[in-house]
Image (cartoon, helix red, strand yellow):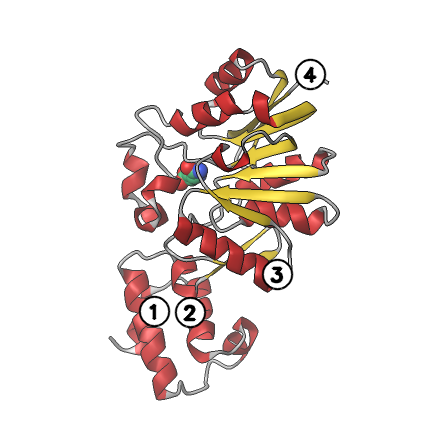
Amino acid sequence: MKVSEALRALEAREARLLLAQATGLSEASVLAHPERELPADAEARFLEFAARRARGEPIAYILGMKEFYGLPLVVSPAVLIPRPETELLVELALHQGFGLALDLGTGSGAVALALKRHRPAARVVGVERSAAALAVAQGNARRLGLEVEFRLGLWFEPAVGERFDLVVSNPPYVREGDPHLGEGDVRFEPRSALVAGPDGLESIRAIVRGAPAHLNPGGRLLLEHGLGQDAEVRNLLRQSGLEDLDTWPDLAGIARVTGGGLKS
Ligand code: GLN
C-alpha cells in the first residue's frame, strides 16, 4: 500500500492520529505541514497502522491510548476501551460524598482513577478479575501519579468484610449472541468485559446480591447498564433492599446508569 492510498482509506481524524503516532509529531504539527516528507521508518510504521485499522482494529489499541474523563489512559486488548457514556457514571459518583469508594471490574482503571483524580482525599479501591487488565490499571495509576488500591479478584471477593460509602461498576452487560458483538471495536475487545450471560444481567445480579453487605449505612451503589435494562436493574436493587432508586440517561438519551442506597 502507498501512503496516499492509506490516507484515502482512513477518516481524516484517524489519519492525523496515526500519522502523529508514526512520526512522533503532534497532531497539530501533522496538520500544519502536509508537505513534509515522511521518513522511511515513519512511513513503514504508518502503513502498518493503516493496515491494522483496515482490518478493523480499534484506533485506541493501535495508538495504545484512550482519553477518559480528561485522563490519558494506556489501553491494550486486555481491557475494554473506556467509553464516553461511562463518564456519566463518574459524574454521578462525584455528586456523592464519599471517603471510601470501590470500583468493580475496573479494567484499565478508568473509573477508579477518575474518581481519585477528583477526590484526592478519598480512598479508592479497584477490583479486577483479569490479571492482565489489572496490570494495565496499575500502570495507568503509576503514570498518572494516582494512588488507587488495585486488587485481583471477582466482584466483592477481594473485599470480604469491608464496607464502602460508594460502590460503582461498569460491568459486562451485553447478551450472549447479541449481533452488536460482531460489529466495530467490540470484536477486538475482551469478551469477559462485555458479555454477561443469556440476558446480559449475570454480572449485575452478582454485584447487586453482594452490595448490601459491602455498603455503609447511607452508602450508594451506581451501575452502568445497557439499553432497556433499567427496569430490571431497579427491580434487582429493590429486591436486594436498596432504596432511593434512580436511573439517569446518557448523552444519547439512553437510560444508562441506575443507582440505589442503603438506609442510613
Ligand atoms: N457499552 C458497551 C458496548 O455496548 C458495553 C460495555 C459493557 O458491557 N460494560 O459495547
In the rendered image, residue 215, in percent from the top left (x then y), is placed at 63, 26
Query: Distance between the Cα atoms at labels 3 and 2?
Result: 23 Å
Q: Are marks 4 and 2 in contact (CB under 8 Å)?
A: no
Q: In the structure shown, which secondary structural element does the residue marked by tag 3 occupy?
A: helix
Which of the two residues, 193 or 151, is positioned nearer the viewer here? Answer: 151
Compared with 229, 253 (above or below) is: below
Q: Which mark is residue 49?
A: 1
Identify which amino acid the numbered label 1 is placed on: Phe
Compared with 123, 264 (above or below) is: above
Q: Are marks 1 and 3 in contact (CB under 8 Å)?
A: no
Which of the two residues, 222 or 164, is positioned nearer the viewer here? Answer: 164
Q: In what quadrant does ligand 1 lie?
A: top left
Q: Which residue is mark 2?
A: 18
Residue at screen point 46% across, 51% down: 134
Comes first in the chain, label 3 or label 4 = 3
- The quarter holding residue 9 reads bottom left
In the rendered image, residue 185, in percent from the top left (x then y), is placed at 36, 49
Query: Distance between the Cα atoms at labels 3 and 4?
Result: 36 Å
Count of number-bearing discs: 4
Comes first in the chain, label 1 or label 3 = 1
Residue at screen point 48% across, 78% down: 24
Q: Which residue is mark 4?
A: 263
Q: Are marks 2 and 1 in contact (CB under 8 Å)?
A: yes
Label 1: few (<14), some (14–19) or many (≥20) C-alpha neighbours in 10 Å:
many
Query: Distance between the Cα atoms at labels 2 and 1?
Result: 7 Å
Q: Are marks 4 and 1 in contact (CB under 8 Å)?
A: no
